[in-house]
Amino acid sequence: MTQGVTPVRAFVALEIPEAVRTALASSLDDIRGDLPQARWTRPAGWHLTLKVLGEVDRPTLDRLTEELSVRAGGGPSVTVRLGSSGFFPRPTRARVAWVGGEAPNAPATAAAVPQAARSVGFARERRPWSLHLTVARLRSPWPEPAVSAFLDWGRRLEIGAFVCREVVLFESDLRPVGAVYTALERFLLQ
């Protein structure tokens, strides 16, 4: 990684394969028109966040890269099956709509990332990791019929399982058209 004084907005995540993004986007298109207005996230940016880092100086990012290569690199690959939906913080006060799922073999990888971050000075996570993919940011909470429709859609969602074979350290560049994510480092999983 190159040294510099400008901090980098960064996060660590699992990538979602293009075929899965396409299938999920198609399924969302089937329901989006029936839901209230929201800022829908772009499929090209979809990922499963393991740790949000925020603004990070380059020396810290370099140390984190070394820690991630030791703690996360070589860990077990993660098999994911998307198939649920929900809201943060809760349906009646929703600000974020998400797609969830299962990743039974994710705990080791999901734990290795915050451990690596803590070892170079990042704060301990307040909540345990939960698999979610942000699909929309809501300007105001949706009415109950829309909440129910989105939750019902999520219960019926069937996206084939996929395997994540890398943990990726991303830079997030905020632009008028939305955030653009660039992979800075990749850590291969087994």
Image: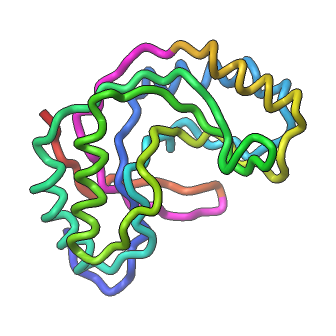
Is residue 126 inside the magenta stretch?
no
Q: Position of residue 190 (x, y in %)?
A: 12, 33
Q: Is residue 114 above or below residue 108?
A: below
Quarter assignment of residue 155: top right
72 sits left or right of 157 in the view:
left
Q: Position of residue 122 (x, y in %)?
A: 33, 73
- Name the one closer to the observer, 60 or 174: 60
Q: Residue furthest front?
A: 127
27 sits left or right of 45 in the view:
right
The rendered magenta stretch, by its main secondary structure, is classed as strand
- Name the one closer to the observer, 29 or 132: 132
54 sits left or right of 14 in the view:
right
- Name the one closer to the observer, 157 or 185: 157
Count of numbered tags: 0
Is residue 163 inside the magenta stretch?
yes
Q: Position of residue 153 (x, y in %)?
A: 69, 19
Quarter assignment of residue 125: bottom left
Q: Position of residue 96 (x, y in %)?
A: 68, 47
Give the residues in magenta: 159-176
Image quarter in which the N terminus is found:
bottom left
Q: Is residue 172 above or below residue 15?
A: below
Q: Is residue 34 above or below residue 44?
A: above
Q: How is the image coloured?
A: rainbow
Identify which residue is drawn at 83% across, 47% down: 141
Identify which residue is drawn at 75% across, 40% down: 91
Identify which residue is drawn at 24% across, 61% down: 115
Q: Is residue 135 above or below residue 21?
A: below
Q: Residue furthest bottom?
A: 5
Identify which residue is drawn at 37% across, 39% down: 15
